[in-house]
Image: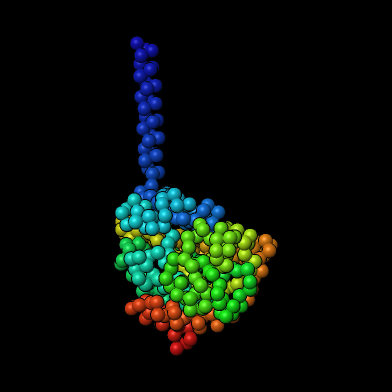
Amino acid sequence: MFRTITISRNFVAAALVAASLMGAGAAQAADYTLKFGHLANTDNIWNKAALKFKTLVEKNSDGRIAVKVYPNEQLGSEMEVINSIQLGTADMTITGESLENWAPLAALMAVPYLFDSSEQMKQTIEGPIGEKIKQQVIEKTGLLPIAWFERGPRELTSNRPIRKPEDLNGLRLRVPNVPLFVKSWQALGAKPTPMAFSEVFTSLQQGTVDAQENPLSLIQSASFNEVQKYVDVTDHVRSWIYVVIGKQKFDSMPQDLQKVVMDAAQQMQTYEQKLFVQDQKRLEKELKDKGMEFVKVDKQAFAEKARAAVSSALTGEQKTLYNQILQQQDGK
């Protein structure tokens, strides 16, 4: 009898401990989980910024919000993740002018020769025009921009130095399939050829095209230094991207957690901007060390020749805001 009672007491004690542990686990479980998918690899500064956001949100929410970061298109391509957020199966991503598919004003996020400097671009993003773009994104996509990152300027690479528009005559130039880019390079005198990025290295190697244009990050990661001699510093597209969260998901959170998310987003933005400056310097040094020469370009001559083509390609409110940005830059 004594033996039976002892076993029963041990069983009860074990059950109480298990129940206690389960209760503690339940108490620690997050109230909200944010699935944050993006296309950059694990070493990219975008992913480092996303992980910074995760750390801040989880700490400052006392674990009430869990953030799961999925780099390398683990949740799908940029467009697929946007669709998933709209369906409620994902929550956050990093996206840019692709938003033009829903919000036409998003085209202004990547317009050739619209900005001469990072400072000009920042003034637009954080001013009334940037707010109009942001509000249209919210209204048309259901995505709420909570931070923005600067993209590295797009530069031209070639096997002969390009310093002025006349040097482009007859140059067979690979461009992405973006009508605005094609029209701009045609106006500058080149022969733009839309082509998938995956085909560019071989096409340069075989002489199918003579040149291409991309940010330093892609020039370096694609090893274009092996088939191109010069980086012609055209800075022809300065653009930005948004970190977005599904507005429905954001609105479902209590105000104190919304504040945690927005505060973390601002700290993430500041953190990424510091990484961006360092990364641009690193990329330039690496490409120079690999034998590429950086060529100074007459940017004003390029801009003047390209802007008429850009303006004609924009329509409606796109064109109105484009002209307003130019007027602000001229101090009018």
Instruction: Tell me, yes or no, if residue 149 can be seen here.
Output: yes
Q: Is residue 101 above or below residue 32?
A: below
Q: Which of 225 and 130 is in front in this view?
A: 225
At 62% from the left edge and 64% from the top edge, which residue is drawn?
A: 228
User: Along the horizontal axis of the image, is 40 left or right of 6?
Assistant: right
- Vertical position of residue 32 compared to residue 279: above or below: above
**x, y (%) of residue 17?**
40, 30
Residue at image position (41%, 52%) is 76
Residue 109 at x, y percent in the picture: 43, 70
| Pick the front one: 265 or 315 | 315
Query: Would you identify the image quadrant in which residue 98 lies?
Result: bottom left
Q: Report the residue at 58% width, 63% height from top.
A: 207
Query: What scheme was used to colour the molecule?
Result: rainbow
Quadrant of the snapshot with the C terminus? bottom left
Picture quarter with the N terminus: top left
Residue 274 appearing in the image: no
Residue placed furthest toward the bottom:
332
Count every numbered label the image shows and give the total: 0
User: Which residue appears farthest toward the top when viewing the image?
Assistant: 1
Q: Position of residue 135 (x, y in %)?
A: 34, 70
Vertically, is 105 above or below 248?
below
Q: In front: 248, or 193? A: 193
Question: What's the residue at 61%, 78% (across, down)?
Answer: 163
Q: Where is residue 47 in the image (x, y as percent from the top left)?
A: 50, 55
